[in-house]
Amino acid sequence: MARRYAIIAGSGFAGLAGGQPGRRPLTGFGMPEAPVRELEYGGRRVLYLARHGDAIDVPAHRVNYRANLAALKLSGVSHVLGVNTVGVIRAGLRAGDLAVPDQLIDYTYGRDHSIHEGKSARLEHVDFTEPLSSSLRAGLVAAAGEAGVACHDGGVYAVTQGPRLETAAEIDRLERDGADFVGMTLMPEASIARELGMRYACLSLLVNAAAGRGEKGIYDDIEASMESARRKALDVLQAFFARDGRA
């Protein structure tokens, strides 16, 4: 079966799809947060969905992840690249670079974590030992190399509830738990994609030092790093789809 790719992106990527109207299919979980639009990357037609809505006004803990992923599934998507921004916990990693995590720890609560709910739903325990697709991850890392972009291969993404940022003590705890990065959107996006039978990996933009770890304020750090990281992410996506087209 031919691969059908989609990108789900959030803050920092407003307006990526221009003024295209797209389509907003009704799913069994309601409407997705934004229309599903088609873009061209590296010579391929790729679908795009704004995770937090076109106005980037739906906070991470309120995103309808089930509807977003179900809309992509209804659109024929088989492979999903989630693009997100994260804070850096591990020493030695730099804001402004990228990472392709290979593991996660989920600290979220109260979100709709599964499509298997309701009296008519079947019970299914998906294997989540390796939560992120190894083949998609390898493709992203290789694309970063071809694009000449600094990209950390692997790492543990701590998914926090939000919408507030973490305290310095909470970041210390996440580090003790083994986390390298902290963000709010990887879960349940990754697990719902798994339930729907879609391969999923994420490209993380390192935009700030986590709470208590930086030499300047978090928002000053983000302002200084976001645009550089965004350009690098777009270069990696272009290289990824050009590379995949040659495979």
Image (cartoon, rainbow, N blue to C red):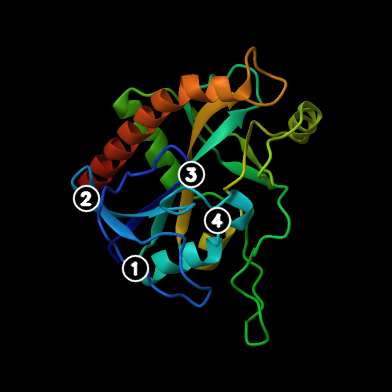
Mark 3 residue element: strand
Q: Secondary structure at mark 2?
A: strand
Distance from the alpha carbon under mark 4 to that under mark 3: 10 Å
Instruction: State which mark lies toward you, 4 or 2.
Output: 4
Q: Position of residue 103 (x, y in %)?
A: 61, 43
Three-letter amino acid code at the position of disc 1: Gly
> Disc 4 marks which amino acid?
Glu
Q: Nearer the viewer, residue 74 or 10?
A: 10
Q: Which residue is mark 3?
A: 202
Residue 147 seen in the current view: yes
Residue that sits furthest to the top in the current view: 215
Callout 3 amino acid: Cys
Circle 4/circle 3 CB separation < 8 Å:
no
Residue 158's spot in the image, x, y percent? 67, 40
Distance from the alpha carbon under mark 2 to that under mark 1:
15 Å
Residue hosting label 1: 76
Q: Amino acid at mark 2?
A: Arg
Left or right of 175 on screen, residue 14: left
Q: Secondary structure at mark 4?
A: helix
Task: Point out the tag, 4 or 3, that comes first from the N-terminus.
Answer: 4
- CB under 8 Å between callouts 3 and 2? no
Pointer 4 with pointer 2, Cβ within 8 A: no
**Residue on which the image places disc 4:** 189
Q: Residue at x 33, y 22 (%)?
A: 148
According to the picture, the residue beneath numbered tag 2 turns out to be 44
Instruction: State which tag comes first along the sequence, 1 or 3.
Output: 1
Q: Residues within 10 Å of mark 1 (few under 14, many from 20)?
A: some
Residue 176 in the figure: left or right of residue 206 = right
Compared to residue 240, the image places residue 220 above or below, namely above
Residue 42, relative to residue 36: is it above or below? above
State left or right for residue 160 relative to residue 200: right
Position of the N terminus, as image quadrant, is bottom left
